[in-house]
Amino acid sequence: MLKLEKYIVVLLGVFLSIWTSLYIAGFFLVEAGIHRALFIGITLIIGFLTKPLKINYVGKIIDYILIIATVLTFGYYIYFYNELIMRAGLVTNIDVFFTVLVLIILLEAIRRTVSIYLSIIIVAILLHTLLGSKIPFFSTESDFSLERVSSVVFLGNTGIFGIPLDVAATIVFIFVLFGAFFAKSGVGQAFLDLAFGAFGGVRGGPAKVSIFGSGLMGSVSGSATANVVTTGVFTIPLMKKVGYSSRFAGAVESVASTGGMIMPPIMAAVGFLIAEFLGIPYFEVMMMALIPALFYYITLFIAIDAQAGKRGIKGVPKQDLPNIFDVIKKSWYLFIPLLILIYFLVIKRWSPGLSGLISISFIIIMSWIRKDTRINFKKLIESFDEAARGIVTVAVACAGAGTIVGLFSLTGLGNRLAIILVNLAGNNLLILLVFVAIIALILGMGLTATAVYLTLVVILAPAIEAFGLPVAVAHMFIFYYGILSNITPPVAIASFAAAGLTNDSPMQVAVLSAKLAIPIYLIPFTFGFNPAYLLIGTWSTIVVAIITGLLAIYAIATSVIGYAMTNLSLLYRFIFFISGICLLLPETITDFIGIVLFMFVLITQIITKKRQRFTAVSNV
């Protein structure tokens, strides 16, 4: 990128950050559609400048043509906004022209910044809309004209300018900005120091540090890959130092970093989209995500502890660990903005956008307490710039998702896909959830958390809802499995990033990550069959679900590693695994079978452990 282009990107980033902040704060009372158009127009320009075509000068010419086309297209929409809204449905030839142009611009931007597969999906759905009566199996009663497509996709506040883009242009961007400022304040190192001080000295300590450090950082960063490279540079060498293999260290870091995206309060900003789609307060989304997120990290913690016990891995010597009280004394003020965010989101129940803005202001204020954390003018501009660059993929994906939603509303294709999936599953919920999980893992590979959710939810959620499950279950199931694509071969981007830090085979790290996550892959099925895990239902069913769930993930995690209190034989590993599966099913009889099997293995482990101690003492 040329020096002039870098300056342009920075200026656009600063403008976008300031404009959006003032808009959310209520200083600019413009129409929502105008704000969305301005937002997506600027992000598209930033995307074309930061992800240029690399075909010598020809590519540069194409980039500039796309940028000019973007300015003209969204300039047309903004300038004639009131007229376009007033004559809704009366589409002119120039409207059709700009609709075709915006689709070309958007598809190319998606190809560059999100995934070519999403572009292909949109093209396929667009062709189905235009030529649906001629397509077998998915045929429509009639074809839709370009005028009808224009009225839904480009004109008005639907399609490209629908709910997904609205959330990206307000809430999501504010929290991307929050993450950028948070990182500049140096809170990442404080998170790591706290985790090291708390868990570095216990059995397998550095790996457990990775869990908590990555979880804390990931809950505000929103990117598994960024989380890996941020915390992994500290945790992976220490894991290797105490005895873990480099491959295992990379797998632990990638799985731990991926989990941060489902951890409240921010949930990679996808939680805000879920709240908008479901039409519920964000607080309820956080509460629904809490138990699955805790189960995710508890499962990983158990697996790491079992591996450490199996290999006799100790913790880091106490003298080499930071003192927790010293860390808090030195960095306490860095955590105040996060506490303020939680206060306004959870207790005051203010809007996410305004809560985020207030928290950002506190980040800047608190950073000035110490010189080394101070956010000066340079860091301020860098934060604006990083946030604008970081929102490009999200904004483009949201515009693409809005396009899909708009086209689905015309053709009803979403409902037909749901019927086809249900029929293929033979009206069996388990088979349907397996289908949905596989599709989510495949389509989610290489996509960001937001792009994964938006791509999948409009296609797959209706199928799950067709079984009569709460709509929240469908959204959380898809979100969870889309996130797990980060550690699922063959395109496990978080695992590949960790492999770059371990100098190990990316595919082997990805395979080991998937093995570590076997119990985690089962967690979405728990709330698929039992919504109590999402805190839906009576308190008695929720408490029972949590207790049996904890026993289940312990049994499954230790059976995968092959160690509980002592090494587990293949027979006991199988029994423990079956015990865990039974405990996950929401039936009294399966709970009873699961507990009996669990107690059988646990008692044999206690007896075996006592015999080993007795033998060791006798030999002395």
Image (cartoon, rainbow, N blue to C red):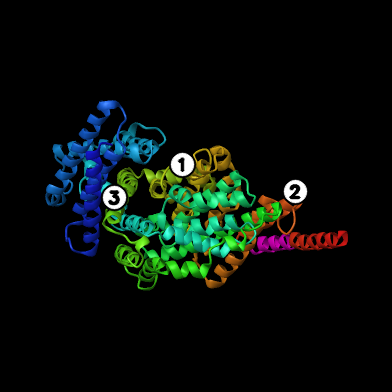
Asked if the stretch drawn in magenta spans residue 596, the answer is: yes
Asked if the stretch drawn in magenta spans residue 609, the answer is: no
Mark on residue 385? 3
Residue furthest right as drawn: 618
* Vertical order, 101 against 184 (above or below): above
Picture coordinates of residue 125 (x, y %)? 34, 38
Contact flag, marks 2 and 1 (Cβ < 8 Å): no
* Residue type, label 3: Asp
What residue did someone put label 2 on?
A: 570
Q: How far apart are marks 3 and 2 (CA)?
A: 54 Å
Residue at point 60% right, 48% down? 240
* Residue type, label 2: Leu
What residue did someone put label 1 on?
A: 445
Q: Which of 530 and 324 is in front in this view?
A: 324
All told, the count of numbered labels is 3
Picture coordinates of residue 372 (x, y %)? 37, 60
Contact flag, marks 3 and 1 (Cβ < 8 Å): no
* Residue type, label 1: Met
Q: Nearer the viewer, residue 485 or 242?
A: 242
Q: Distance between the residues labelled 2 and 1?
A: 33 Å
Residue at point 58% right, 39% down? 508
Q: Which of 515 and 423 is in front in this view?
A: 515
Range covered by the magenta-colored residues? 587-599
Q: What element carries label 2?
A: helix
